[in-house]
Image (cartoon, rainbow, N blue to C red):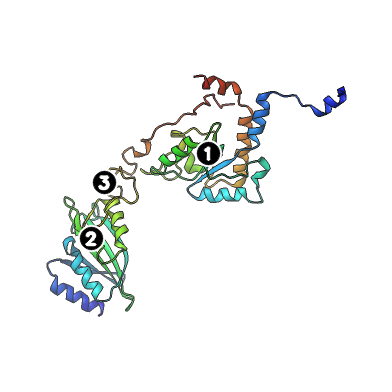
């Protein structure tokens, strides 16, 4: 093997960048659609704003096979234990998108039975405003999340697993 | 049998139960005491009012009325296309009245809903448990004295942290 073959066939990078590249380009979403945002999310999957361009078209309805939880819709006090359970069933690494006003803040439903923002109880990475958000908003949030995933450090995982 | 005949028959034979008779938007409303609900509704059913269109309740806390709670039955006759509304009043300190599940099976879930949201109990109901709220829920949210923002139920959950991903994500 001469020097030119090595130059054109070998790519040098770090493990961290390679892993982050793989993770950010194969986010498998688990939709948790409880209201109209869930309907709007279906439009995101369709041809016009096709999220398979971002490697995120593999919608998994099992939390054990997914990386990305998309909470779309208002969460009532009866649904919150279910959401917590689904979040905990997802394997690490995992990320959460809070889609729409209701999931992020409770929206107009300021009543006894509606959770005022899921980030009171589970960690959220990206929030999408809107009631419901346009599909372009969801695509934007997915790109934002890809940037976040790209900046993650393997040392953070290593540190905490020794704990 | 027509609605007028049935009403006069009920007024005659169940005068102890009947509190009054009003009309709204061309439809008759008969106000009765809670314990008479089986007798009155059985009479209506025998007279051709075969369909229980709705079963709900009203909290008269600020409205005024014969009693604090009124359980409302909407009946429809498929034969004569007539409708009638029955309001059965139950007091605040003992909100109990007989279940009409034996007359219409559809009353099963509707009575559970009224029990869940108003705390009105139905004697003889086969399975009087909450239908909407969680089983361990306390209180009856559609009562007018229930606070709109609740009693902190919506904050009563464990807080889940990031698990092994503890780092900040502020960049």
Disc marking residue A25: none
In the structure shown, which secondary structural element does the residue marked by tag 3 occupy? loop
Of marks 1 and 3, the one in the foreground: 1
Q: Is residue B52 above or below residue B121?
A: below
Q: Badge 3 local density, few (<14 within 10 Å), some, or many (20+)?
A: few
Dot 2: element: loop
Q: Nearer the viewer, residue A148 or A133?
A: A148
- In the displayed structure, A119 sits above or below B138; it is above
State the separation of the CA atoms marked 1 and 2.
45 Å
Q: Is residue A76 above or below residue A2?
A: below
Q: Is residue A39 left or right of residue B6?
A: right
Mark 1 touches mark 3? (CB < 8 Å): no
Picture residue at 45% right of the left edge, 45% below the top = A74
Disc 1 marks which residue? A64
Q: Quadrant of residue B168 in the image?
A: top right
Left or right: A71 as drawn, with respect to B156: right
Tell me which chain the residue with mark 1 is part of. A
Residue at (87% x, 23% y) in the render:
A2
- Badges 1 and 2, same chain: no
Q: Position of residue B53 (x, y in %)?
A: 33, 66
For residue B91, side relative to residue B115 (left or right): left
Q: Which residue is mark 2?
A: B99
> Which of the chains bears the disc numbered 3?
B
Please name the residue shown 21% across and 79% down the image.
Answer: B5
Residue drawn where x is 46% and y is 43% of the image: A107
Q: Earlier in the sequence, mark 3 or mark 2?
A: 2
Residue A91 in view here: yes
Name the residue beneath numbered marker 3.
B145
How far, Cα to Cα, is label 1 from label 3?
44 Å
Q: Quadrant of the N terminus of chain A?
A: top right
Instruction: Select label 3 or label 2 by which is in front.
Output: 2
Instruction: Assess whether mark 2 and mark 3 are in contact (beta carbons under 8 angstroms).
Output: no
């Amino acid at each position: 093997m001469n020097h030119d073959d090595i130059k054109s066939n070998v790519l040098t990078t770090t493990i961290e960048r390679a892993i982050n590249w793989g993770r950010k380009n194969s986010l498998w979403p688990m939709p948790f659609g409880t209201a109209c945002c869930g309907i709007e999310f279906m439009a995101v999957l369709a041809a016009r704003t096709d999220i398979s361009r971002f490697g995120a078209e593999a919608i998994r309805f099992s939390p054990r096979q997914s990386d990305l939880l998309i909470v779309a819709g208002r969460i009532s006090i009866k649904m919150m234990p279910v959401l917590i359970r689904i979040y905990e069933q997802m394997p690490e690494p995992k990320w959460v998108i809070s889609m729409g006003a209701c999931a992020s803040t409770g929206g107009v439903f300021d009543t006894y039975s509606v959770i005022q923002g899921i980030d009171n109880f589970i960690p959220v990475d990206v929030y999408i405003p809107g009631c419901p958000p346009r599909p372009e908003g969801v695509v934007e949030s997915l790109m934002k999340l890809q940037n976040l995933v790209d900046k993650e450090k393997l040392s953070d995982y290593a540190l905490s697993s020794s704990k | 049998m027509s609605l007028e005949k049935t009403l006069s028959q009920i007024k005659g034979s169940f005068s102890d139960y009947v509190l009054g008779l009003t009309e709204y938007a061309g439809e008759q409303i008969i106000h009765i005491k809670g314990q008479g609900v089986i007798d009155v509704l059985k009479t209506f059913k025998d007279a051709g009012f075969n369909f229980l269109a709705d079963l709900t309740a009203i909290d008269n806390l600020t409205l005024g009325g014969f009693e604090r709670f009124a359980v409302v039955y909407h009946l429809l006759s498929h034969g004569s296309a007539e409708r009638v509304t029955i309001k059965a009043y139950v007091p605040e300190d003992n909100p109990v009245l007989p279940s009409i599940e034996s007359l219409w099976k559809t009353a099963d879930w509707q009575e559970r809903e009224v029990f869940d949201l108003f705390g009105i109990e139905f004697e003889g109901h086969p399975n009087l448990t909450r239908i909407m709220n969680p089983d361990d829920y306390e209180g009856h949210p559609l009562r007018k004295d229930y606070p709109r923002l609740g009693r902190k139920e919506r904050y009563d959950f464990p807080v889940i942290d990031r698990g092994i991903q503890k780092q900040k994500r502020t960049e």
